[in-house]
Amino acid sequence: MFVFGQTSSDPEKVVKDSLQGDYESFKRLTEHYKQMQDQHSERMIDMDLAFKKSASPVTQERQKFLRRIPKFWSTCLRKHEDTKLYFLEEEVSDFIDKYLLDLEVIFTPDPRFGEENVAKYGREGMCIKFEFAKNEYFENDFLVKALGKKRDSPAGPGGDGSEDWIGFCEFVTPIKWKDEKLAKELINNEESESLNGEDLCDNMSFFNWLTMNASEKETDLDDEGCDKFSKAIVEDLWNDPMVWYVADDDDSDDSDDDEEFVPEEDMD
């Protein structure tokens, strides 16, 4: 039988044998490139944080206008494809329509974030703050979900010498429910499971997502602690809310564009 070649079970040994005396030079070059990548990533983060700092006064001023538009944020949330599934339950949708006053994303350059929270969530951390009108369900005026990074394995003594970070999220404002029976109307207590590779959060309502604490290892979060819902808020709704407010409220499964085709009569 003709053999094209065999693959070594030790790829690093193949590299050493192939490069021989040049292996150490190659290794240093590779490490140098990795350092350049890391430095570039840090510069990009610095630029992003500088933008968020300069944009903060603008978005705070924008909030004053958006608050005057009835049901503004609830409308946006029910139009984005990655958030509208969380408001399918009538009780939750009605509650958000009636009581959600404001939504705000706060980043680490904002003094309100606080140095203690920067240390906890990392300098790329963020929090999503929801403001509610007085209601019969809970006493809170504000509910906050925080997203960030934390060290997965310790560096130095006892660790492997590397700094591995994972994304995580947590609910930082315990809900002060006025009535447990009413709480059950907003929180679905059925266990959510990831099915057929779907995002775990696809099976949740808004309040299930809000009160969820999770890490990148446990569910479908990215390395910044964002699931699909929070990423849609941070990257889309917050960045350009008017696009989503004025967007057509189409059902992707039953769009007007999918009308049945009726052929024209034969002209012959």
Image: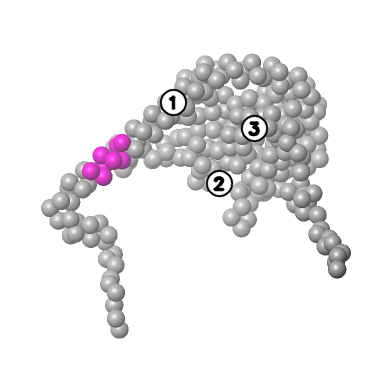
Instruction: Of the two numbered discs 1 and 2 on the same chain, state the one appearing first in sequence.
Output: 1
Check disc 1 and report its element: helix, strand or loop: helix
Instruction: Of the two numbered discs 1 and 3 on the same chain, state the one appearing first in sequence.
Output: 1
Between the residue at mark 1 and the residue at mark 3, the CA separation in whole angstroms equals 21 Å
Residue 35 figure quarter:
top left
Residue 172, above or below 14: above
Q: What residue lies at 55% left-to-right and 38% top-to-bottom?
A: 226
- Mark 2 is on which residue type? Thr
- The stretch of residues the image draws in magenta is 29-36
Left or right position of 202 against 166: right
Q: What residue lies at 63% left-to-right and 29% top-to-bottom?
A: 240
Farthest residue, direction bottom: 1
Name the mark on residue 237: 3
Report the residue marked by disc 1. 47
Q: Are marks 1 and 2 in contact (CB under 8 Å)?
A: no
Instruction: Of the two numbered discs 3 and 2 on the same chain, state the one appearing first in sequence.
Output: 2
Residue 231, above or below 60: below
Farthest residue, direction left: 21
Mostly what secondary structure, the magenta segment?
A: helix
Residue 11, above or below 237: below
Callout 3: 10 Å neighbours few (<14), some, many (20+)? many
Callout 1: 10 Å neighbours few (<14), some, many (20+)? few
Check disc 3 and report its element: helix, strand or loop: helix
Between the residue at mark 1 and the residue at mark 2, the CA separation in whole angstroms equals 30 Å
259 inside magenta stretch: no
Residue 192 on image: x %, y %: 66, 49
- The number of numbered badges drawn on the structure is 3
Residue 14 figure quarter:
bottom left
Left or right position of 81 against 263: left
- Mark 1 is on which residue type? Met
Report the residue marked by disc 2. 219
Residue 20 on image: x %, y %: 14, 56
